[in-house]
Each structure stands twice: as C-alpha cells, then as structure tokens.
Image (cartoon, rainbow, N blue to C red):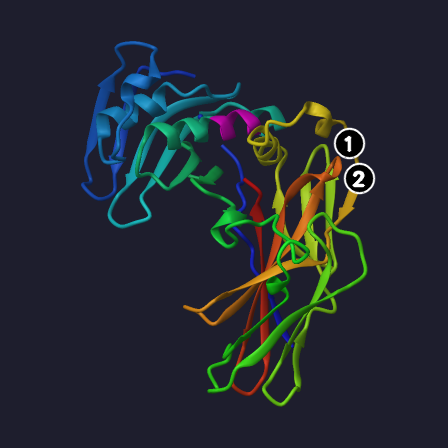
Amino acid sequence: MRKRILLPAVLLLSGSMLFTGCVNNVNADRAVTTEAVSDDIEQFRTPYVGDNTKVVGVASHLDYPEGLKYDHIEILSEKEPYGLNIYVKKDTQDLSNDAETALLKSSDTVFDLIGNVQTLTFMDASNNETIAEFQRDPFAKITDYFDDPHKTPSDDPNMLSASYDINGDGSDESIYMIDAGVQGGDGGYTLYVEDAEGNLLYSADDYRITAAFSKDDGVLLTVADNELTRISPAQLEKIYSKKESSDKWKNYEDGFTTDGDYISGFTIDKDTNTIITKSLVSGTEGHADTLGYVLSFIKISKDGQPDVSYGFAVDE
C-alpha cells in the first residue's frame, strides 16, 4: 500500500512602529508613501489588500518584537490567493520564542484588518530572505469534515457502516468499523473496506499517532512513525487561546508525549470518492483536553489498491 504524508501548512514565523512606508505592488509595479496620522491601527481597516495607503498603515503600526523594524511592503495581488510581504530591518540574528509569539499575534492583526489577504510573509529587507510566514487558516477545522465531530457510534449505530462505490468500479464497497476494545475520547475503532465479493481492500492496522510536546519546539505530530506536522509554541498557545481553557496546559514537562486514539468515525466525500476518518489527539490534560484530530484520506483504485494520506485539523 502506498502511503503519503500530507504536510499541512506550518507557520514558520515573523513585524515598531515607523511612520513612513514604501509599498511595492507586484501587480501595479508602483511605490506609495504614506504618513500615519495616529497610533490607532483600527483606522486602517480595509477589505482589500490592494488598498495601498491603508495596508501601509496597518503594516507600519504593528507591534514588532525587539530587533525588527518596519521598512516597506510588497502587495501580491495579481492572482489569488492574495498575499502581503512585509519587509523589516533586522537587528538580531536569531528570534526568540517570545518574538515568534509576537509575530503570530501581529499576523492575527493583519488578517483581521485586511479582509482578503490570505498569506503574510515577513522578509529581511537587507537580503530578501524569509523571516516568517503565515496563512490565514494554517490548520483545517474538524467541522469542515464532520458536522458533529464528538458524536460517536454509541450515540448513533448507523455511523458504524456504509455501502458506497468508493473506487468507481460499478459495485458498492462495504465500509465498516469494528470496536477495537480500547478507550478513547470519542471511542476507538478499526476501519475496514471490502469489495462486493468480501475481499479486504483496506484496514487501518498501523495507525499509531503520537504528539511530542517541547517547551522550545512546540508539538511534533507523527503518524505511523512519519512526521505529519509541527505545531510551534506560538501556534500551540493560539490553539489553546480559542478553547477558553485554563492555563494548566502550559505546565507540561519537556518530553511529555500523548498517543492519539484509534479511529472514532468516518465520512465519505462523494465528490472525490474519498473515505475520511478522524482520530482524536489529546492535549496536555488528557482526553478532556483535545489538541485536535488526525485525518486519514483513503482512496481506492479500480484494481483495489488503497492510497492513504494524512492531515491535521483543530477542534474549534
């Protein structure tokens, strides 16, 4: 079986206030200079990244970490997804985790104030090297795939099985889950796919998930011993900030590791003939604290060969 690890967009990272700014618009190839009239960044809110004056206002009023100062911007508006490059003068060689957190918060400000910008990159003005980059939505949401992700087969036995022509051969395959006899936040099951004659096409038999926590590096998420994605300390704090949970999660020790659960449900994307499963990954406080979900995307060819890739989704 051929397996492929999908790497969801992972934020690297990178924004003092300067009152004049030059903007490079790669679409219009022109420069604009503006002066900010106050420190109230809200006045520069705009639905369009192409609004040069207001975008310069936003970029020049961000709260940059020590060692970075605003220089100019570049607007990427020729085609979607629209982007914004903020060039900064860099007075330090390495950025601290605190600086990373500050840049992540600055990216939140940019995405809030500039309506249609999808990507944000902080660049070193001296050499055009990337300092940090962000996407508006770096991680998928579990509700993009499951309407009620915490609903379990014990709530609805119909969740345990389905019949669908998943490989387009003209006959329905049988897709079903069997209780694996393990505890899990949303239950623990093994998924099987059989053809119309009862031949096994796929079983999720090597679905080991681990989440290794580090104070300096955040979380390393692996599936079947392969790296899936890394969640930086700043991203981890952002995930928890949306959960309105206590600060106890910060008290984990370096080397703390959690194991992901077995599969707790599946759905079928009939547009792409893909089976999508979900497996809960607990956070620092056990199953009551959901870090997110590992998703598997299972496609099966007409000759019965499965192709599996993986992704990560947050629980919001």
Identity of the residue drawn at 41% across and 21% down:
62
In the image, is residue 221 above or below residue 39?
below
142 in relation to 96, above or below: below
Q: Is residue 286 visible?
A: yes
For residue 181, above or below residue 47:
below
The residue tagged 2 is: 256
**Displayed quadrant of residue 1:** bottom right
What residue range appears in magenta? 100-105
**Residue 286 location, x and y as percent?**
76, 39
Q: Which mark is residue 252?
A: 1
Residue 235: image location, x then y, percent: 58, 35
Other-residue count near label 1 (Cα within 10 Å), few / some / many at <14 / 14–19 / ≥20: some
Q: What is the secondary structure assignment of the residue under circle 1?
A: loop
Q: Residue at x 79, y 52 (%)?
A: 183
Circles 1 and 2 in contact, beta carbons < 8 Å: yes
Q: Is residue 162 left or right of residue 250?
A: left
Residue type indicated by callout 1: Tyr
